[in-house]
Image (cartoon, grey):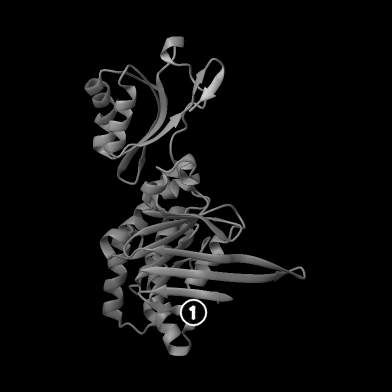
Amino acid sequence: MISVENLTKSFQHNGSTVRALDGVSMEVNPGSVCGVVGPSGAGKSTLARCIALLEKPDSGAIRVDGTDLVALEGRALRAARQQIGVVPQGDSLLRQRTAAGNVALPLEAAGISGPHRRARVGELLDLVGLTDKASVYPDQLSGGQRQRIAVARALAAKPSVLLADEPTSALDPGTTDSVLTVLDRARSELGVTVLVVTHDMAVVRKIADDVAVLEDGRVAEHGKVLDLVAEPGSQVSSTLLPATDQAEPLRPAAGGGHDVVAEVVLVGFAAVGALLPEAGNRFGVDLAILGGGLTRLGDTPVAKFRIGLTGERSEAALNWMIERDAHVRRAPVCVDGVAAA
């Protein structure tokens, strides 16, 4: 468990004080992937550097498995740093070393013997799918391959936490997927807690269990991805889910429209596949999809639709869907030119 409590960090810039982090608090569950997102200057990289103990915060606590890392010094601090693997932003491999040599660097620094070192390097090259590139130098690798080697190097000392700062920056979509797959394997096969700093919400869509949205050094939203996408007005929801038709409120059935208009978010295979048609059949109402679509968050299908229901039992059908965990926001219906809830 990573727990960040009321973290603050300021820098001096051109004679003035810039507060990069302003009371940031968040938690990352063990064995999960958490995406930290936000625009440039939001404080994402500063937060990652503080958690990695590369920057000391002005105040607040960073607890990993209950230990406050900010309070550590000397040998205890060095031992704590070994439990946190870091994938820096940009290309960080040493050009004079092969792929295997780069992965071996932390093991050499820790004094791991040759046979054990070679065995660990082999395991990690297999994890990132680059066993055949062991003797290849970085300049002979693609950008995505270099980034996967950087992930392997960060995992060499068997850390419990992996921090990746913009790991897919400047990569094409196919190469991005290969890097994200490696991060996901680190979580699922090694049990590592992964914190990914990114400006790309596609990273969150692909592998994140949780997400924290930073704005101006503060946490604007934080929680499980599948919970946040169901919240009306959530930034995460508006970014990750398909857009629905935001037309003017529709007229009721008597005026050629619908009795009930609503925005519905459905999560999971059963809900996405069956809930809407079953509601229509069960309550004898006509149900029309007016906008929206389907997407996938990790392995979970999620749908966001704007729907219109027509029939005497339209409200009952909508309430039945709510009882079965559909997330519903009713839209106003226009009556005699006036929008009414």
Q: Secondary structure at mark 1?
A: helix
Image quadrant in which you'd find residue 336: top right
Q: Which residue is mark 1?
A: 70
Q: Is residue 70 above or below residue 10?
A: below
Residue at the (32%, 70%) spot, across then down: 121
Q: Can residue 27 be seen?
A: yes
Q: Can residue 142 be seen?
A: no
Q: Is residue 11 above or below residue 288?
A: below
Image quadrant in which you'd find residue 86: bottom left
Q: Camera-side residue: 111 or 13? A: 13
* Amino acid, disc 1: Val
Q: Is residue 252 above or below residue 183?
A: above
Residue at the (77%, 71%) spot, across then down: 15
Residue at the (48%, 40%) spot, across then down: 238
Where residue 176 sits in the image (x, y, percent)? 43, 49
Q: Quadrant of the N terminus?
A: bottom left
Residue at the (25%, 18%) spot, across then down: 284
> As drawn, which residue projects farthest toward the bottom?
74
- The crowd level at tag 1 (other Cα within 10 Å; few <14, some 14-19, many 20+) is some
Q: Camera-side residue: 125 or 311? A: 311
> As drawn, which residue projects farthest toward the right?
15
Where residue 113 sits in the image (x, y, percent)? 30, 83
Where residue 319 sits in the image (x, y, percent)? 31, 32
Q: Camera-side residue: 301 or 251? A: 251
